[in-house]
Amino acid sequence: MVDFSLWDILRNLLLAARWTVALSLVAFIGGGLVGGALLLARLARWPGAQRGVALYVQLFQGTPLLMQLFLAYFGLGLFGLDVSAWTAAGLALTLYTSAFLTEIWRGCVDAVPRGQWEAAESLALGFGETMRHVVGPQALRIAIPPTVGFLVQVIKGTALASVIGFIELTKAGTMITNATFRPFTVYACVALLYFGLCWPVSAASRRLERNLRRGH
Amino acid sequence: MVVLDFPAVLEQWPALLRGAGFTLGLSTVAAAIGVAVGVACGWARALGPRPLQRAVGVYVELIRNTPFIVQLFFIYFGLPSLGLRLSPELASIIAMVVNLGAYAAEIARAGIEGTPRGQFEAARSLALNEFQVITRVVLPPALARVWPAMVSQIVIVMLGSAVCGQISAQELSYAANLIQSRNFRAFEAYIVATVIYLVLAVAVRQFLNWIGPRWIFGRVPARR
């Protein structure tokens, strides 16, 4: 039997943490794009968009992320696609992220006073121009702290991808536990690594929020 | 051509029902204890002595910045090496309580810190002791203020409990997994389980919103 030192455990976990970061970034960026598109559809008052997006948000916020991952994994397979854990996890986490971000951002847009919309309209600005020059910049300022805060949720969410066989930090922890029989040490290291990833992001979100409040 | 076979899953309804009941049971116990832990910690963090504030702060930050599944695995797989062997159910409940406690602490703290100073002073001037000040004067309106956030967090923890199936606690996602291992209808089984989770989430939210003002933080006198 190979002996694992604490350094071996940490080194292997650190290598696996790259995949946690990669999956988080994919989900966050993909979710941001989809969430932004949904937000625009809602704001532009496309027929059915209000109700459709509300339903979409309710579906993703009202069901476990684990189930969403399973459905993506087995659902894509049903259509004869050869799904890798990467595809399924990326898809499920992207949709999950988009549902939360679109809701967060809607709140931020709503926080911009109505008078700003009316003023833009009275200046004969179209929807695109209003978003780009008037409402968008103001909403963006409010949106940054909660968006950064949600990144923490996404990073933690990627831990569930381990269940469908995506080898990231948590899965690596399980595999190393099976090899070393030292679950206490290994999972403590896993938790600390997640903390190391998430805490700076949480702290940044809090600092941004303080600055925003001070700015007013 | 994709053919879905829901009857194959639905005919195993007793397993699904048991799983859903189990999920509800886990969540009820975890929510009751977790909110209590959260209120105590929130109180300590808002008004307790400095070292206690620091300690609660560390607990809250540690839990809020690590995934629930890792907390669960640490408790279920890690603690036995310290001689603490837990059943899957107990480990699940402990993990849920520890997790909810941290989030609830932040929520409760926000409510308690929103209490005007005058309320404390008024209560003390009426010769209420410290405990009465807490339970009779400060907590009811503080909880009422943050109850919607608390309800959301309880629902999040209930949905998060789907992970407990991974340590073979026999809740809803475990039941779905069992069914799909019998009839290989994985997609259908998880669809059905997901819909049940959705129904549970909506029902629990409604129930807590209803019961909160009536039982949890007492009758808040109507504003005149």
Image (cartoon, coloured by chain):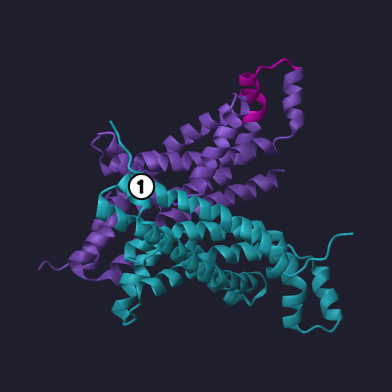
Chain colours: A purple, B cyan
- The residue that disc 1 covers is B7
Image position, residue A137 (x, y; %): 63, 31
Image position, residue A124 (x, y; %): 72, 15
What number of labels is visible? 1
Q: Quadrant of residue A39?
A: top right
Q: Which residues are magenta?
A: A123-136
Chain of the residue that carries numbered disc 1 in the rendered image: B
User: Type of residue at label 1?
Assistant: Pro
- Please, is residue B201 above or below residue A132 in the view? below
Query: Nearest the camera: B81 or A65?
Result: A65
Q: Secondary structure at mark 1?
A: helix
Q: Quadrant of the N terminus of chain B?
A: top left
- Please, is residue A205 above or below residue B110 in the view? above
Image position, residue B109 (x, y; %): 65, 65
Q: Quadrant of residue A30?
A: top left
* Left/right of residue A40 with respect to residue A21 in the rendered view: right
- In the image, what residue occupies the spot 28% across and 60% down? A173
Please say whether residue B154 is one of the residues in the magenta stretch.
no
- Residue A31 seen anywhere in this rendered image of the structure: yes
* Left/right of residue A146 with respect to residue A7 in the rendered view: right
Q: Badge 1, how many Cα within 10 Å: few under 14, some, many 20+?
A: few
* Left/right of residue B177 with respect to residue B209 in the rendered view: left
- Please, is residue B53 above or below residue B204 in the view? below
Q: Residue furthest right?
A: B224
- In the image, what residue occupies the spot 36% across and 67% down? B169
